[in-house]
């Protein structure tokens, strides 16, 4: 009589111990226990009447630059107050103890994985703490030659800051809906998802593509998939094992070895 199959956590821990190549895909849920509202959380205060998806687009920024800029400024101010939680730390510590075994792919733009010490983070959607120009910002000289692109450090302060000479706008360096993801980061994430033996999917509703597609790719490539979330997700169908709970609670247990 063979013993009963191991409980989900024990099974997942066994796969972590056995896997030489682990890919982890995280979403906004892994920052929830740091006090960062998830993307699907109801917007509050000034933003109560807007959905995040309707603010995080180039169209919204071009139509209402101050509204979108101030939304990001409010998120940046909130981020300045928060720290990585036990889930972020467990991932960083595992990478430190097992160099090269775990590739971290995140949809989050809050920089908390990096702040916790994770290395080589594949930030699919950019980083909220960085800025860039909205348009290619090239000024032309008297003879029509390209003089030089504008220097963000010279931007005229404002909501948003802008270029003094060509009025180009400064924007957050994140990927908005309808924008392509950084090619090199996405290619590296694709490689990690297709080459891994185990994928952990933590804290994401699995609604946003192409990020969510990485869990399907891992499953189709023969990896075991563990989904960790307190709620059902759109990626539960890719899971061999589901851990129902929060990432700060489960990741330290899962990655303890
Ligand atoms: C693209 C940066 C090619 C900005 C983000 C029409 C036109 C154009 C594109 C599309 C279209 N229709 C669909 C698309 C594709 C679109 C998309 O997927 N839309 C969705 C809404 C259907 N994707 C794109 O546009 C992408 N680009 O496809 O380019 C293209 C180009 C042109 C035309 C066609 C195609 C770009 C997507 C990137 C968008 N930018 N962020 C910013 O942050 O302001 S995405 C944003 O959502 C965040 O990064 C967030 O991380 C991400 C995903 O959400 P989740 O992380 O899953 O967060 P969510 O709140 O949903 O869920 C949280 C989960 O945590 C929940 O499950 C909850 O239960 C759980 N949880 C809660 N507490 C805890 C917890 N888990 C663990 N522990 C806890 N304590």
Image (spheres, rainbow, N blue to C red):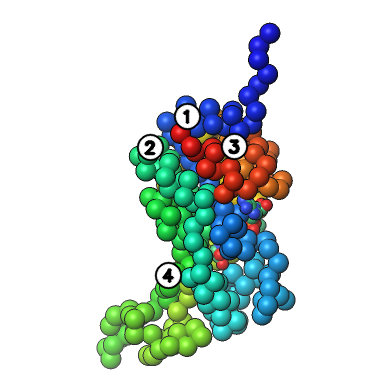
Q: CA distance from mark 4 to mark 3?
A: 32 Å
Label 1 SS: helix
Q: Position of residue 72 (x, y in %)?
A: 54, 74
Pick whichever of labels 4 and 1 is earlier in the sequence. 1
Mark linked to residue 47 = none
In the image, residue 90 above or below residue 182: above
Disc 1 C-beta below 8 A from ligand 1: no
Mark linked to residue 98 = 2
Label 4 SS: strand
Q: Nearer the viewer, residue 53 or 101?
A: 101
| Badge 2: residue crowd in 10 Å (few <14, some 14–19, many ≥20) | few
| Badge 1: residue crowd in 10 Å (few <14, some 14–19, many ≥20) | few
Q: Nearer the viewer, residue 55 or 182?
A: 55
In the image, residue 251 above or below residue 219: below
Q: CB of mark 4 within 8 Å of CB of mark 3?
A: no
Mark linked to residue 17 = 1
Mark in the foreground, 4 or 2:
2
Q: CA distance from mark 4 to mark 2?
A: 30 Å
Q: Position of residue 196 (x, y in %)?
A: 47, 35
Q: Please tell me in which quadrant of the rendered image residue 59 appears.
A: bottom right
Label 3 SS: strand
Please name the residue that numbered disc 3 is placed on.
226
Is residue 132 visible to the viewer in this orientation of the structure? yes
Disc 4 C-beta below 8 A from ligand 1: no
- Relative placement, left or right, of 118 versus 229 is left
């Amino acid at each position: 009589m063979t013993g009963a199959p191991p409980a989900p956590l024990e099974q997942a821990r066994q796969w972590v111990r056995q896997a030489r190549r682990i890919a982890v895909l995280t979403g906004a849920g892994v920052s929830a226990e740091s006090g960062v509202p998830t993307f699907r959380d109801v917007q509050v205060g000034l933003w109560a009447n807007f959905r995040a998806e309707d603010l995080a687009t180039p169209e919204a920024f071009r139509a209402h630059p101050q509204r979108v800029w101030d939304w990001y400024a409010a998120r940046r101010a909130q981020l300045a107050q928060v720290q990585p939680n036990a889930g972020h730390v467990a991932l960083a510590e595992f990478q430190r103890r097992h160099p090269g075994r775990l590739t971290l792919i995140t949809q989050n733009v809050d920089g908390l994985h990096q702040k916790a010490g994770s290395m080589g983070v594949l930030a699919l959607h950019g980083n909220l703490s960085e800025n860039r120009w909205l348009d290619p910002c090239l000024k032309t000289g008297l003879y029509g030659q390209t003089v030089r692109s504008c220097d963000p450090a010279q931007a005229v302060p404002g909501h948003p800051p802008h270029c003094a000479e060509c009025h180009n706008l400064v924007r957050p360096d994140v990927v908005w809906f309808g924008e392509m993801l950084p090619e090199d980061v996405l290619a590296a994430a694709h490689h990690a998802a297709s080459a891994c033996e185990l994928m952990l999917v933590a804290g994401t509703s699995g609604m946003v593509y192409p990020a969510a597609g990485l869990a399907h790719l891992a499953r189709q490539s023969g990896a075991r998939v563990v989904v960790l979330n307190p709620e059902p997700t759109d990626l539960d169908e890719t899971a061999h094992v589901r851990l129902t709970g929060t990432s700060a609670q489960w990741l330290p247990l899962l990655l303890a070895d």
